[in-house]
Amino acid sequence: MGQRDDDKLVRQLSLVAFLMAQQRPVTAEEIHEAVEGYGGMSEQAFLRRFYSDRSELEGVGLRLAVERPSDDPFQGDLYAMPPENYYLPPIEFDEAELSALHTSLYLLEGQFAYSEPLRLALQHLTLGRPSPLDDHAARTVAVNLLGSRHTSEVSSHLIKVESAISRRKTIRFRYYSIGRDDHGDREVDPYSLLYMAGNWYLVGYAHDREDLRCFRLSRIEGRITFKTRAEHDFPPPSEVDLSRYRDRAPWQLADPVGTAVIALSPTITWWVDQMFGEQGQVEERPDGSAVFRTDYGGEREIVSWVLGLGDEAEVLEPPPLREATAQALERLRTRHATKPRRRAKPLPRGPEPAGADEAPDDPSERVVPVERISRLLALMTRLLAACGRSYEAEVPCAELRAELNLTQDALEEDLTLLNLINFGGGCYALFAQVEGDVVMVQKEVYGDQFSRPARLSPLEAKALLWALDFVGGRLPLVGEESLGSARAKIERAVGGETSTGVELGTVQTASEPVGAMLARAVREDRVLEIDYWNESRGEVTRREIEPHMLMNSRDAWYLVAHCRRAGEQRTFRLDRIRGATPLDEHFERRPEVRAVPYQPWGATGTDEPRANIATVWCSPAIARWLAEEHPSAERFSDGSVIVEIPYASDEWLVREITKHGGEAVLHTPSDTRAVVAEHAAHLLARYAAAGARR
């Protein structure tokens, strides 16, 4: 941070301090004369800077009170900082609520885009109270809310979009439309942020389309700018139904063109009803099979979903959709029964286009930073609270660095600025300096003014409420009832700052009874017997497991356990656990069982997940989407690509290739190509036989 920014922070904090020290409203002239940083300015320069500072302070939740005297028409406005405009209303949390809040921070640390504002908010709320971290919950739950596409650039987009939503500002940006393979400028009135499957989206009114549209933040290119300098650009939006984006199945992203009728085997009827019952109707038959009716807008997406289910699903109607499914299987069989060939001229290797996998950036840059003025206020309050009724205190540097996530250099820079805050007339709040491993604090004349926490900034309040929304109902072990009561208390305290402007996508988890059973078994270290649907093998198996940990990744929940059948660690996706029965036996936790980064091709019990690499040619119809998720090895003039896809089992790879109906062709491993062709022929025979019977 440059010297000019430091001067601004000292000036703004000195303005707050001066107003809090006065027992009466003051004029602009008094502020001009007394506040550090305004001296020596012309009147016009002072007014410009004062109004700018006032606006920025209001942006972090510190609103100046303005009085307009009615008895003297020639007197200007009077300004004050009433206590209720500065101090955070006290909130009395019980131990369970406090534990749930701190456990939430622990779980979201580094995995939540707003974890830094959340940290600062909890510092305000729990000042002077210990952090009763629920150690058991901390070791039995793991969370990963940042998808592979979340970069430091996405975090900067989040800051700008969140500000635009709260200020009702029209924004402009350049956007890559993956569906049309088009780069173009957009002008949008932002209404809400949407978090879904590890990705952030902006939902707003698109001026070029004159309709509501959804934009993935990782596909925004370059900077986001405001259209005007006006305070507001558009009126508050009327009730906006975001369910069309939040609760849709993949085949319902476009406007419906028909209703698919799909036969389901008894093996997956329960799963389809659990996962997609809201997007259609499941009519179960006496033998456990069912017919699933669902509206669809994307033919390719519904066909892909059915093909991925293998023998467990078959398209019955409408006839064009059934024929499209058969054609996809024929294309899949033909392209894997013959030798793979290149269909276009390779393009020269160059930089990866927008959306391609990038090298991991610094994790600290992937989270939204706090406003530095809020951090300075939190640090000042923490130091003065340590003094209590005394005028001196020692605070370990390590505590401050951990609480505020600061480096030693950043801590010392912040202390230097705090020492400069002037209440006017040469009065200060504190003097603090590092001596060895501690910060020596001396409380000055007006120190007590800052010994109580300041109000949460809008960003801190929203981060706190967003975190509670993420955690509540999503993390089975952190005390949902305590989180609910804590949230109600926080909403009352922050008042009008409770509108978060964020919608959350559906979490993929087990049915409520099964989920409760699993959570209880993890807490009690109890052996479970589960019925598990293995999608790759298309079968339901019964297993005895020792459940160690629940893990969240990209809005899906997984159970990390020692599987007695396999004799080693296994990871089970919760929504595929059909039933669970607790046994009387308890188990000793195994130190070798640990959470590892879950991959869609299957996690292993080692620190370095084992994976083979398949090379897959993707036609222009699907190349853009596959290249966005996987690194591309080669690109061709017709828009097709070869991508590298990790896999842990041949069964998974065959299913994954089958989903794309011949638009993805397996090049290596070559011996698996025949397996894909045989699988396609087997499925195709069902459609041909049923057609002949008709």
Image (tube, rainbow, N blue to C red):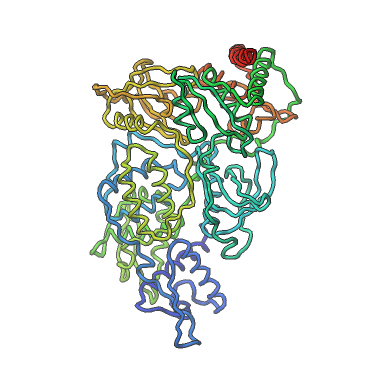
Q: Quadrant of residue 680?
A: top right
Picture residue at 29% right of the left edge, 43% below the top: 133
Which residue occupies the foreground of this view, 93 or 57? 93
The image shows residue 585 at horizontal and vertical percentages of 24, 21
Picture residue at 39% right of the left edge, 50% below the top: 119
The answer to whether 375 appears left or right of 622 in the picture is: left
Q: Quadrant of residue 476?
A: top left
Residue 103 visible at all = yes
Q: Is residue 398 above or below residue 294?
A: below
The C terminus: image quadrant: top right
The answer to whether 378 appears left or right of 329 in the picture is: left
The image shows residue 51 at horizontal and vertical percentages of 52, 71
Picture residue at 37% right of the left edge, 49% below the top: 401
Which residue occupies the foreground of this view, 289 or 1? 289
The answer to whether 105 appears left or right of 241 in the picture is: left
The image shows residue 580 at horizontal and vertical percentages of 34, 24
Total number of numbered discs in the rendering: 0
The image shows residue 207 at horizontal and vertical percentages of 66, 53
Which residue occupies the foreground of this view, 396 or 339? 339
Residue 670 visible at all = no
Q: Is residue 65 above or below residue 565?
A: below
